[in-house]
Image (cartoon, coloured by chain):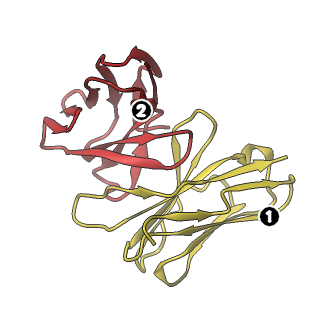
Chain colours: A red, B yellow
Amino acid sequence: SQQGEEDPQALSIQEGENATMNCSYKTSINNLQWYRQNSGRGLVHLILIRSNEREKHSGRLRVTLDTSKKSSSLLITASRAADTASYFCATDAVRSFQKLVFGTGTRLLVSP
Amino acid sequence: GAGVSQSPSNKVTEKGKDVELRCDPISGHTALYWYRQSLGQGLEFLIYFQGNSAPDKSGLPSDRFSAERTGGSVSTLTIQRTQQEDSAVYLCASTPIRGAYNEQFFGPGTRLTVL
């Protein structure tokens, strides 16, 4: 079964609004990563947060991690139409050091 | 090359035929992964190669699936006697293993359609 489950499954917003996506996972992790996928093809790495970190920023992206709740959130501020894509979280489990397990993804639609 | 490349980009085959999918990782990356993504779904791990170590084949769905990595570089995923449920996008990724930071660099994928 999938390690990560994203919610919502789909999100539709207007340009300029913020988008928040959540990810829950099941086992202890070394780190958690977020990826973006356009048009069902290759994924692009967005940000990595380690298990001992609680928050991280990169440009318009803000990621939080709560290891006690086994959850993470990705916030995209001031969204743009070009942010339309699917977003996946991926976890690097403690006993599976180098093997990422991906969640089911959130499909984000940003309308102009 | 500049990134991970995969070929072919699209493959249509008939049920029962064998197919080979190729992945060229980024030069110098020691780890290589294969994933499968069915329509509208997340990524399903298939197999992982790391240097000269024995590959982690724990994600292969059946013995019809196999993969090789020659010379620590190019990898080929082979699906024998394809079935319609094998239809999916097959994604390859590579990474330079460096401590706990294993960002993966993905190729564009091969879309396999089994008729």
- Check disc 1: other Cα within 10 Å, few if <14, some if 14-19, many if 20+: some
> Which is more toward the observer, B19 or A58?
A58
Left or right: residue B46 versus residue A100 is right
Identify the residue at image location x=68%, y=62%. Answer: B8
- Residue at the spot of label 2: A82
Foreground mark, 1 or 2, reads: 2
Q: Amino acid at mark 2?
A: Ala
At which x and y percent is residue B111?
67, 50
- Residue at the spot of label 1: B18
At which x and y percent is residue B69?
54, 76
| Chain that bears disc 2 | A
Q: Find residue B6 and name its label.
A: none
* Mark 1 to mark 2 CA distance (whole Å): 39 Å
Q: Secondary structure at mark 2?
A: helix
At which x and y percent is residue B9?
66, 57
Quadrant in the picture for residue A40: top right
At which x and y percent is residue B114?
80, 49
Q: Looking at the picture, does residue B70 appear above or below residue A64?
A: below
Q: Looking at the picture, does residue B40 appear above or below residue B73?
A: above
Q: Secondary structure at mark 1?
A: loop
Left or right: residue A76 versus residue A7 is left
Q: Looking at the picture, does residue B92 appear above or below residue A3?
A: below
Q: Amino acid at mark 1?
A: Asp
Identify the residue at image location x=26%, y=27%. Answer: A75
Identify the residue at image location x=18%, y=30%. Answer: A68
Mark 1 vs mark 2: tell me if same chain: no
Identify the residue at image location x=53%, y=65%. Answer: B5
In contact (CB < 8 Å): disc 1 and disc 2: no
| Chain that bears disc 1 | B
Left or right: residue B21 versus residue B75 is right
Q: Looking at the picture, does residue B92 appear above or below residue A67?
A: below
